[in-house]
Amino acid sequence: MGNILAIVGRPNVGKSTFFNRLTGTRQAIVDPASGVTRDRHYGKSDWNGIEFSVIDTGGFVTGGEDEFEEAIRKQVQLAIEEADAIAFLVDVTEGPTPMDRDVAALIRRSGKNAFLVANKVDHSGLIAASAEFYNLGMGELHCISSINGFGTGDFLDEVVARFTKQDAEQEDDDTPALPRIAVVGRPNVGKSSFVNALLGDERNIVTSIAGTTRDSIHTRFKSFGFDILLIDTAGLRKKGKVFENIEFYSTMRSVRAIENSDVCFVIVDATVGFEAQDLNIFSLAEKNHKGIVIVVNKWDLVEKENNTHKDFELKIRQKIAPFTDVPIVFTSVLTKQRIFKALESAIKVFENRRNHIPTRVLNESLLPIFSDNPPPASKGKFPKIKYITQIKTPYPSFVFFCSLPQYVKDPYKRYAENQIRKLYEFEGAPMEIYFRQK
């Protein structure tokens, strides 16, 4: 099960820098133009062997100064609802502000795992100055510097100590073997209708399972030869009083559902097209190594011409590149057209994700290909692949043992992945390729 750490706090306390330090990327600052939808606010982190997701709430606040406070308050409320732990960042150089006090009050009332983190403690002289934050009534204070890394290790020790306990509790789930299929997508793309079309008349054979997580609805679907758990994020927005940034909201909801799934239906609205936020949700599933089926819904509402279907599919594949080996199913929930085709695709992807190729077979089929097309020389060095094996992970992972692995570049890794996909059935399953010294 996934663990989620949300970074909250008012503007300019260093949330993005802290996010970059935890996730090992510099994307949020260095290159705002490329990859904005993919990497800006969500990342994976790992500490002492425990993997968790990090969400930076900072980049989602837009608008003038007067709109800031309301937007931040709503985001903090949502983060409190969705995350397993909260890092509440404050700025030691400015001291506690009224907005800090408001955020602290919200977090205290929630009773959530929350950590008060004084940032910008860039030298030991500032540790004493941080003491005034104890007035916020948040308990222990963690002094860190996002810039130079001071204190982040001790802080993460505390965070993952809370996470491990949760993992232990979640292992006694009574239905681990059924494929868990999440229905995700932007608001209003037809997620509810898709789930209802599936469950429709079969309500009597469907049993709701009390949420294995607080906030996604797990429904067992046992009919037409299928036996799966549907994780539905659709009906979860009916909060009445919540009018937050939609992108932030759908990302937070999707992260939780995706992390608890094996395969994701990424639902897309055919009348709108495959947009930046669709790509964002697709990328969340890909980063989490979950199986993916893209479901283009409302296809009955699109004006058809000769090649409409092929053109639409091509546009999606161009946007999701380089991971294009994904089934795309065109459906209409109104007519139930190809609904079960989507389910069949999801089961196939579930099996593909668990597909394991014996080492002998891999080497016999792939080594000749890679000896004919070895990695290109880099700085006069010629890497040579000697041996390939698939390692035991919940998703497909391959290790290429070779000489000089540090000279094998990303384009060749993609080439290697494509060769594996050509020979073996891994459609819809994200893959990891590692080059190691032999």
Image (cartoon, rainbow, N blue to C red):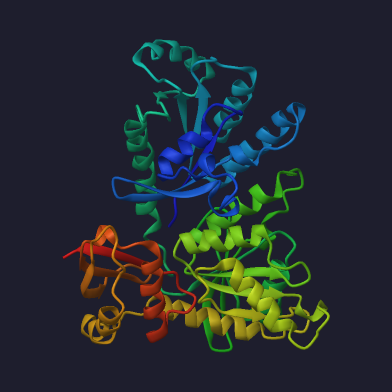
Measuring 77% from the left and 67% from the top, which residue is drawn there? 272
Measuring 61% from the left and 86% from the top, which residue is drawn there? 341
Q: Position of residue 172 (x, y in %)?
A: 37, 61
Depicted 424 relative to depicted 61: above or below: below
* Quarter of the rendering occupied by the C terminus: bottom left
The quarter holding residue 170 reads: bottom left
The quarter holding residue 279 reads: bottom right
Q: Position of residue 330 (x, y in %)?
A: 68, 81
Measuring 28% from the left and 86% from the top, which residue is drawn there? 365
Q: Is residue 260 visible?
A: no
Depicted 71 relative to depicted 424: above or below: above
User: Along the line of sight, which residue is nearer the eye, 23 or 252?
Assistant: 23
Q: On the picture, is 302 further left or further right than 117?
A: right
The quarter holding residue 209 reads: bottom right
Q: Position of residue 189 (x, y in %)?
A: 73, 66
Q: Position of residue 109 (x, y in %)?
A: 58, 31
User: Along the line of sight, which residue is nearer the eye, 191 or 414?
Assistant: 414
* Quarter of the rendering occupied by the N terminus: bottom left
Q: Is residue 68 visible?
A: yes
Q: How many marks?
A: 0
